[in-house]
Image: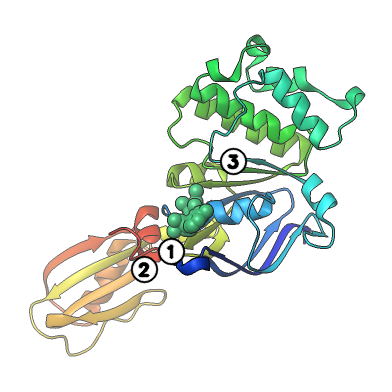
Amino acid sequence: MAGKAIRIAGLKKTYGGQGGAPAKEALKGVDLDIPEGSVFGLLGPNGAGKSTLINILAGLVVKTAGTVEIWGFDQDKNPRQSRASIGVMPQELNLDPFFTPRGALEVQAGLYGVPKGQRRSDEILSMVGLADKAEAYARTLSGGMRRRLLLGKALVHRPHILVLDEPTAGVDIELRQMLWENVRRLNREEGMTIILTTHYLEEAEEMCDEIAIINQGALVARDTTRNLLGELDARTMVIEPEETPASLPELEGCEVETREGGILALTYHAREMHAEDVLDAVRAAGIRISDVRTEQPDLEDVFLALTKGAHD
Ligand code: ADP
Ligand code: MG
């Protein structure tokens, strides 16, 4: 089994609560391991706690309880090594307006103790498509350019792990593609572990090997994307019989549930059987069908079901 890039145990964060201010429990005891070399998606609705978790990894938010290990280094016991192992592109576009892109990369490299001879500001600038803006003032950069510069800053110290917090929220298609190309290349060619948060489900489907879904400060699902999507070939055939059935249909791999009014709901996996097989089993049980319809979930449904209560 591959090693773990990140190990999080019992992670809690409560904001505020001092001086009579209402406390906000943003993380309620999260356990999460992220495998080395993966592209890992952290999904959840707004306010779920994604940025809080990311910012704890980045060392920007102080946790209330729990342990965080980054590349095998405990964040509390080995703060320097754990910080050196990770690069974070934050959600907020917080850039010093007085630095040029090259200047910003140099300062960042200095902060991480990268010696002058090992800096690669120009390489990074061209990678993120800012070579021709190397000397422009940050305040003259468009939102998309700032985001690209933030990606560049996250990479100056060649981290093992790259974390992107909502990298494509509100960006145009061109920038989105450029970001994903870079991310894929860093993952494939340099073996960099990538962790990203998003609320675009198609993006997660396309990019991520594994996905965790967080809601109201707690993990509600954690699986390979393949398995999560595998769940989505579930189909439910809803049958209204002409009269109350004397016996229920029996079919291996098909789950039969009776609903109000004698309605039968038969759930099966489209990969394993055809609708016709299910209908045959219904007829074999002597049931005459008065009406039939099918229900079919998509990732949106799975997500909504798992994050119920967060969308009102
Ligand atoms: P997400 O990134 O999933 O949208 P956040 O981690 O930003 O969620 O926020 C989780 C919860 O914590 C939200 O209810 C948010 O309002 C609250 N929160 C985030 N940052 C702060 C803060 N600095 N002070 C108080 N509450 C905060
Ligand atoms: Mg956020």
Under mark 2, the amino acid is Tyr
Which residue lies under the disc numbered 3? Answer: 90
Q: Which residue extends farthest bottom?
A: 246
Query: Is label 3 in a helix, a strand or a loop?
Result: loop
Residue 151 screen position, x and y as percent: 64, 32
Q: Which residue extends farthest front?
A: 19
State left or right for residue 285 relative to residue 104: left
How far apart are labels 2 and 3 at the CA level?
Answer: 42 Å
Task: Return the disc, 2 or 3, that comes first in the chain's sequence.
Answer: 3
**Residue 82 vs residue 209, the one in the foreground:** 82
Give the quarter of the figure containing the N terminus: bottom right
How far apart are labels 3 and 1 at the CA level?
Answer: 43 Å
Residue 299 screen position, x and y as percent: 40, 54
Under mark 1, the amino acid is Glu
**Residue 201 vs residue 219, the one in the foreground:** 219
Task: Return the disc, 3 or 1, that comes first in the chain's sequence.
Answer: 3
**Residue 5 vs residue 52, the one in the foreground:** 52
Which residue lies under the disc numbered 1? Answer: 272
Give the quarter of the figure containing the C terminus: bottom left
Determine the residue positioned at 51% across, 29% down.
Answer: 176
Determine the residue positioned at 60% across, 26% down.
Answer: 148
Determine the residue positioned at 24% across, 79% down.
Answer: 284
> Mark 2 against mark 3, which lies toward the viewer?
3
Q: Is residue 41 above or below residue 26?
A: above
Under mark 3, the amino acid is Pro
Which residue lies under the disc numbered 2? Answer: 268
